[in-house]
Amino acid sequence: MVEVKYKRVLLKLSGESLAGPEGSRINAQRSTEIARLVSNVHKMGVDVAIVIGAGNLWRGRDGLEMGIDQATADYMGMLATVMNALALMDSLEKIGVDTRVQSAIEMRAVAEPYIRRRAIRHLEKGRVVIFGGGTGNPFFSTDTAAALRATEIGAEVLIKATKVDGIYDSDPNHNHKAKKFDKLTYIEFLNLQLEVMDSTAISLCMENKLPILVLNLWDAEALPKAIRGETIGTLVAE
């Protein structure tokens, strides 16, 4: 068994990570690629829980532009996260990873209701658990849902997997002089008003002393290195 620093992790994925080149919908190839990355971590003997967004299917701000009430638009987004969770579950199970989806919004025909103790028991039995439905409440992002679930299940780190290799002071895709941070305190993150995660999620992690690691999902070595405790990405901690 590989020696690991983190025994239980919460992986936060964006909905866009499941999208293909068109940037929307669910791309089966992308879902399979993510499943393999998760499987590699799972094989290291790590408890893996996942929260996934819905940006590939629905964004609340799009609903607002259409004149939809914000609470309703947010609920629509929560339902979209369950669709993504089911797609990822299917990809994981096709490669032999036992997986459960739990939803904060009850829909027993397709997913278990979120029950903290049951989620922990699944993890203890070696299953990957995907949390859908956000927090179950409007006005909260899936980042906040990830921070909440990570705290509830006793995760040792919240890993936010993005398209870049850490946190920068500006968008590195548009500014080649953007500065990458190796480590930030929670307060520094909040003061810099960085858009990588919302302030509610950061504050929740700060209150519970839960470290956040931001890394590049598509670097095949990034997740295993993070689990082993090697220097990778950007760490947000005390």
Image (cartoon, helix red, strand yellow):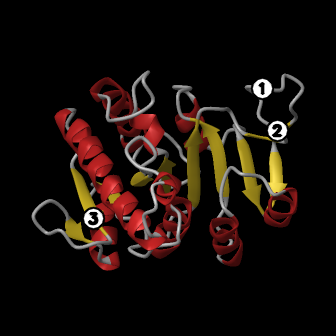
As rendered, which of 100 and 143 lies closer to the eye?
Answer: 143
Picture residue at 32% right of the left edge, 71% below the top: 104
The earlier-in-sequence mark between 1 and 3 is 3
* Residue receiving disc 1: 174
Residue 179: % across, % down? 88, 34
Is residue 200 shown left or right of residue 32? right
Query: Looking at the image, which residue is at 77% across and 29% down?
Result: 172
Amino acid at the residue labelled 3: Gln
SS under mark 3: strand
Q: Which mark is residue 170?
A: 2
Q: Is residue 97 visible?
A: no
Label 2 Cα neighbours within 10 Å, binned few <14 / some 14-19 / many ≥20: some
Q: Are marks 2 and 1 in contact (CB under 8 Å)?
A: yes
Secondary structure under badge 1? loop
Q: Which percent across, then down, holds residue 233?
A: 70, 39
Mark 1 or 3: in front is 1
From the viewer's perspective, is residue 73 above or below residue 84?
Answer: below
The quarter in which the C terminus is drawn is bottom right
Residue topped by disc 3: 102
